[in-house]
Amino acid sequence: MLLNPKIFGITTILCSLAAPSFASTDLSERIEFSGFGRLIGGYLDEKSVEYDGYSDNLSFSQQSLFALQTDVTVTEKLSLSAQLLAHSSEKRESGIEWLYLSYEPTQNWRFKLGKLRTPFFRYSDVIDVGFAYPWILPPQQVYTAYLFSNYEGSSATYISSFDDVTFELEAYYGRFDGDLNQDDRKVAVEVDALFGTILSINSGNFTTRLSVFNSSDFSVNIPELTQFSNVLESAGFIQNAESLRFDSSVTVYQAGFNYDNLDYFLAVEGMKIVSDLLAVPQVDSYYFTAGYNFHPLQAHVTYAVSNSSYNASDNLIPKGVNPQLDQLSFGYDQIISGLPALSLNSLSLGLRWDFTRGMAAKAEITFLDGKPGDNSFFNNVSDPNFNGKATLYQVGLEWVF
């Protein structure tokens, strides 16, 4: 996804206005470099399917990555951040992951403008920084590829404290124009107006996060389905034709709770997607995770669940009237039955070893239990008798600098 020229222009102008102040200070004091990386290997014990790109051949090319981040202090209140990411997976594009200006006029307010992370979930901002969370592979039932990881726009955050309770309220607005991965294929998505709000409350060891995302202008381009929809409309089956349109609204609700006392942690996070689009399923999902720290080791267990459905119209195209209508009717049935069903239960057991500063080794095993006959996040299913069960083994090396 290319950076919006308007946003890029505004960012350049603001930085230019601040240039005199910037030049008066030593450059090395203004620029800070940091980065992170992951080397992840995985193996799936089922030869007839793939899961998140993993198969029965050991692979290090699905989640391995390297990123370099630059933070530039333009003035005391204005800064510029950029992140370049190189990803090993064919499903992810390498390049500028984010590029934004941050303005903090007071200690209570923070504004951002540019290419930003879409803050759907608790770990959305650091989803590529595996060092920041316990898993190797975050629960796919919640951290699904059906939602985009960044957007172009702006955000405003207000932070306030009362006694030992800290409140943080964030609102963001922008657009997205890029590709999403659906059932192992890329789908062009355009969101001209997206809006979201987040409320985070922190008190001692407890953190609560509630958020909602909405877009009433969510468009998906699947040319072959658009053509079929036009044929149905020409034949007079308007309701079925409309169900294959890909220009509607999507709403995402999220709620999460976390407790961490340094010795052990408990967390639960849930998501609900409400959608009128066949390209974006309606999803109810959650995960529960618990872990224990015995430095330098950490052990954790995670149970995750998801269920999905589609807002598809009943087939109103009659069968048995003539061959042409039969072809349309069976074609519609085939499209609906071929939609990926994302019902999956999983249990993950993991171990982390922080063997030196800024580096950690991880090992993880995930037991996958999908419904027979459903996709259940599996891809390239070659055996029609696949029972929906598989085990994913992963090892990883995470680092930050």
Image (cartoon, grey):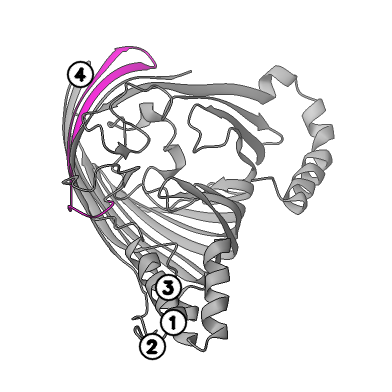
Q: Earlier in the sequence, mark 3 or mark 4?
A: 3
Q: Which residue is mark 2?
A: 321
Q: What amino acid type should be assigned to the residue bearing mark 3? A: Asp
Q: Main secondary structure of the magenta part?
A: strand
Q: Position of residue 103 (x, y in %)?
A: 64, 46
Please say if the residues under marks 3 and 2 sit with CB atoms less than 8 Å apart: no
Measuring from the top left, give residue 123's x and y in whole percent. Answer: 38, 42
Q: Position of residue 214 (x, y in %)?
A: 47, 67
Span highlighted in magenta in the image: 346-375
Q: Is residue 240 left or right of residue 48?
A: right
Q: Is label 3 in a helix, a strand or a loop?
A: loop
Label 4 sits on residue: 297
Instruction: Tell me: residue 210, above or below residue 122.
Output: below
Residue 193 is drawn in which quadrant?
Answer: bottom right
Q: Secondary structure at mark 1?
A: helix
Q: CA distance from mark 3 to mark 2?
A: 30 Å
